[in-house]
Image (tube, rainbow, N blue to C red):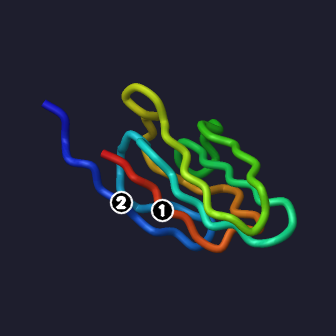
Amino acid sequence: MRSDVQSKRLTGTGSASVGPARIRQIQVLTASGTPRLTITDGNGGSTVLDLDFIASDSHSVNIPSDGIRVGDIYVSAFTNITAMTVFYN
């Protein structure tokens, strides 16, 4: 049985403070410049997602299959991004 999907809005770098999770989807609102988002498996952990976006737009990134498993959702780069919402379970 699968667990319920939850969401959390983030506006900068650091831990999402949700504990172990599977990242299922990310929605990103970008600003001007060259937007980039990098997520690692905890602070200083391996990079699990590294994305560049088009400026001044909203983006939805669906993660296939069972998502990306991490011990902690940690945003290590949040460049020219206004906010993001991560969907996880």
In the drawing, does residue 44 fall left or right of residue 34?
Answer: left
| Quarter the N terminus occupies | top left
Q: Position of residue 33 (x, y in %)?
A: 87, 67
Place residue 51 in its image quadrant: top right
Against 46, is 61 above or below? below
Which residue matches tag 2? Answer: 7
Q: Secondary structure at mark 1?
A: strand
Q: Position of residue 56 (x, y in %)?
A: 74, 69
Q: Position of residue 84 (x, y in %)?
A: 55, 64
Task: Judge by depth and name the residue closer to the eye, 60 or 51.
Answer: 60
Query: On residue 85, which mark appears?
Result: 1
Against 89, is 2 above or below? above
Q: Secondary structure at mark 2?
A: strand
Q: Residue at x 40, y 64 (%)?
A: 8
Task: Judge by depth and name the residue closer to the eye, 46 or 89.
Answer: 89
Whether the residues at callouts 2 and 1 have beta carbons within 8 Å, the answer is yes
Against 81, is 38 above or below? above
Residue farthest along the left direction in this orientation: 1
Residue farthest along the front direction in this orientation: 57
Q: Position of residue 16 (x, y in %)?
A: 46, 61
Q: Kindly report the distance in space between the C-alpha atoms of the residues bearing marks 2 and 1.
A: 7 Å
Q: Residue at x 35, y 51 (%)?
A: 19
Q: Residues within 10 Å of mark 2 (few under 14, many from 20)?
A: some
Q: Amino acid at mark 2?
A: Ser
Residue farthest along the top direction in this orientation: 65
